[in-house]
Image (cartoon, rainbow, N blue to C red):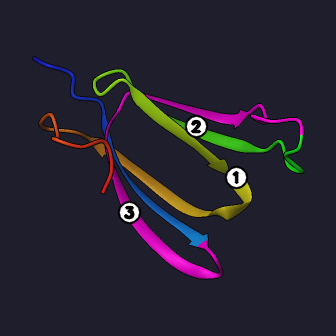
Amino acid sequence: MTNYGNKVLLKRTFDGKLDVSVIRNVTEIHFNYPKIHEKDKESGRIAFESDIHGTGFTMLISEILEFETDCETEKATEFSN
């Protein structure tokens, strides 16, 4: 059986508006990831990474309203929509 990671449904606030996106083939989620730059005011970040696509990103925990994970069933053409 092939492991395609997780599919993540992400609900967050972005510029004061609700943003809902799907992140595909997530293989690692890191809570309270360290701040990237010294100028960052907040250090509480979460990282979503994909070994399958060789990419990832972080965002402030305070911007995330909710996220849900489910087992991914296929390799997606893109990491996120």
Query: Residue 30 colored magenta?
Result: yes
Residue identified by numbered label 3: 21
Residue identified by numbered label 2: 47
Question: Looking at the rendering, which quadrant does residue 74 occupy?
Answer: top left
Q: Which of 71 and 14 is in front in this view?
A: 14
Upstream in sequence: badge 2 or badge 3: 3
Upstream in sequence: badge 3 or badge 1: 3
Amino acid on which the number 3 mark rests in the picture:
Ser
- Residue range (magenta): 14-38
- Residue 20: tell me if it is visible: yes
- The spot of residue 69 in percent (x, y) is 38, 47
Amino acid on which the number 2 mark rests in the picture:
Ala
Question: Separation of disc 2 and disc 1 at Cα?
Answer: 9 Å
Above or below for 19 versus 48: below
The structure residue drawn at horizontal position 46% and vertical position 34%, both measured from the top left corner, is 56
Question: Looking at the rendering, which quadrant does residue 36 occupy?
Answer: top right
- The spot of residue 16 in percent (x, y) is 65, 81
Above or below for 4 versus 20: above
Residue identified by numbered label 1: 60
The structure residue drawn at horizontal position 48% and vertical position 73%, both measured from the top left corner, is 19
The rendered magenta stretch, by its main secondary structure, is classed as: strand
- The spot of residue 15 in percent (x, y) is 64, 77
- The spot of residue 23 in percent (x, y) is 35, 49
Q: Which of 1 and 9 is in front in this view?
A: 9
Amino acid on which the number 1 mark rests in the picture:
Leu
The secondary structure type at the circle numbered 2 is strand
